[in-house]
Amino acid sequence: MPRFKKKKESIEPERKSTLHLWIIISLLVIQTIFLFYKNLEFIKDIFKTDPNSFYAEDENKKQNPETKTDINEAAPVNAENIRISIYNGCGSSGIASFWKEKLRNMKYDVRETGNTDKKYAKTVILSRTEDMKYARQLAKSLGVKDENVIMQLNKDLVDIDITLIVGSDHKEFEKR
């Protein structure tokens, strides 16, 4: 009887189905598109306005002195409409309360007071809106230098227009 040798069966690795991977990838792509679509207005707002456009206007005025309009010459805003938060940045106790009373006497709407985590050498005014006229008016009335007025938008602050951080130089402004 002839002996037949059995052929060795070739063992090939089984090809696993990649269908589940394609499903996961497809779901992630759909989710990404959905989130992008839902946040489209937010993304547009980011690129809509340049918060530093005020400084660009200043540069244009320097180049073109014939321009007669000046932001500082605009009509003053009613102080009662300016909502302020005051933070003690100098470390001395009672400074925020002192400035709260002082600004309320000047007819500003002081909404909150508190302390900062770090100390500030200079008093800083943070504009929480894109319109810097409120912050500039407060700086002018207190005698704070224009270089210490900064735009710092914060969408979490709903009812605050300006944040005043009282620095170690506050005694210069108390006299005014």
Image (spheres, grey):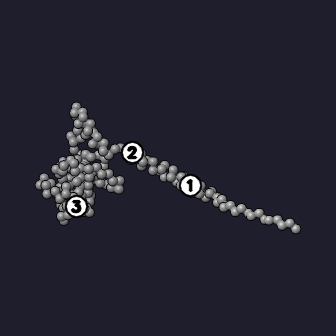
Foreground: 60 or 68?
Answer: 60
Foreground: 122 or 15?
Answer: 15
What's the CA distance linking mark 2 and mark 3?
Answer: 34 Å
Which residue is the site of mark 1? 25
| Residue 172 seen anywhere in this rendered image of the structure | yes
Foreground: 109 or 12?
Answer: 12
Return the residue found at the far bottom: 1
Return the residue found at the far right: 1
- Residue 119 placement (x, y as % from top left): 22, 61
Return the residue found at the far top: 66
- In this rendering, the answer to whether 49 lies above or below 162 is above
Q: Residues within 10 Å of mark 2 (few under 14, many from 20)?
A: few
At horizontal 42% and vertical 48% (from top left) the residue drawn is: 43
At horizontal 27% and vertical 42% (from top left) the residue drawn is: 55
Q: Nearer the viewer, mark 2 or mark 1?
A: 1
Q: Earlier in the sequence, mark 2 or mark 3?
A: 2
Residue 82 — which label?
Answer: none
